[in-house]
Every structure is written in C-alpha cells, then in structure tokens.
Image: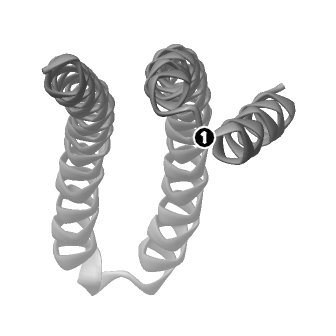
Amino acid sequence: MMMMMLMMLMMLMMMMMMMMMMMMMMMMIMTVMRMMMMMMMMIDDDDDDDDDDDDDDDDDDDDDDDDDDDDDDDDDDDDDDDDDDDDDDDDDMMMMMMMMMMMMMMMMMMMMMMMMMMMMMMMMMMMMMMMMMMMMMMTVMMMMMMMMMMMMMMMMM
C-alpha cells in the first residue's frame, strides 16, 4: 500500500515538472515571437519608406530625361539618397542587435529557472527513490542512486 502511495506521489511530481517545463517553454517561445514581430514591423516600415523615396527619384529622372547634365546631377543625388538609406539600415541594425541581446538575456533567465526547477525535481525524486529503497532494503541500489544524485548535482553546478 505504501509503495502505491509513493508511486502516486512520484507520478504527481513528474506531472508538475512537465507542466512547469511546458510553461517555461511557452514563455520563451512567446517572447521570441514578440521580438521577431517587433523586428519585422520595424524593418518593414523603413523598407516601405525607402521604396517610396526611390520611386520619387525615379519620377524625377523621368522628368529630367531631356537634359544630360541634369541627369548626371540626379544620379549624384541618388547616390546621396542611397547613403542615407544605409544610415537608416545601420540604425535598424543597432535596434536589432539590442533586441537580440534582450532576447538572449531572457533566454538565459528562463534557462536558469528551468535548471532550478530540474534540480528541485531531481532532489525530490531522489528522496522518493531513497524512501522506496529503504523500504525494500536494497542497499546496492541505494548506493547507485546516491552516486547518480551526486553526479547530477555536479553537472548542474
């Protein structure tokens, strides 16, 4: 009977652990998705603006097709515009880098939390196992479990 109870408890613990993990994963995914969305929005906006500018320039070129000299001037202007666009891109890049950094931080934090959870669960599980072993009086098995626990802890640290 006692064994059954223990088993039940362990099962419950496992369930809890799974749930926690799922939640963490979901949170991580959501954060990433949100960041991605923000990035996409930003870049899209800027891109649209640039496209409009380019269209305007093209129109100007069409108007000034009569004079060769003007054409040359327009080309120069276009180059300048391109440079400006590059600057905008740089800004975007900076923003994106920031976003990435934020994402990384979040990920790290989530991972840490998950690790903690895992450690807790492991400890609980080990305790349960020990109890069971004691009941069964399987000393060898118990020793093995102890060893495993130690190893786990070492790896976690």
Q: How far across and down, in percent of the image, does residue 126 sit? A: 55, 25
Q: Nearer the viewer, residue 148 or 110?
A: 148
At horizontal 50% and vertical 72% (from top left) the residue drawn is 75
Q: How far across and down, in percent of the image, does residue 15 sit? A: 17, 28
Q: How far across and down, in percent of the image, does residue 37 sit? A: 20, 38
Compared to residue 15, the image places residue 145 above or below, namely: below
Q: Counting other residues with Cα less than 10 Å from the Cα at mark 1, is it few (<14), some (14-19), or many (20 or more)?
A: few
Describe residue 110's horizontal placement relative to residue 60 as left or right.
right
**Which residue position is annotated with label 1?**
138
At horizontal 29% and vertical 41% (from top left) the residue drawn is 36
Q: Secondary structure at mark 1?
A: loop
Labels in figure, total: 1
Describe residue 128's horizontal placement relative to residue 101 as left or right.
left
Colour scheme of the picture:
one colour
**Picture quarter with the C terminus:** top right
Q: Nearer the viewer, residue 66 or 98?
A: 98
Q: How far across and down, in percent of the image, does residue 90 sit? A: 61, 42
In the image, farthest residue toward the front: 137
Q: Nearer the viewer, residue 2 or 26?
A: 2
Q: Nearer the viewer, residue 10 or 141?
A: 141
Q: Amino acid at mark 1?
A: Met
Compared to residue 124, the image places residue 19 above or below, namely: below
At horizontal 28% and vertical 62% (from top left) the residue drawn is 54
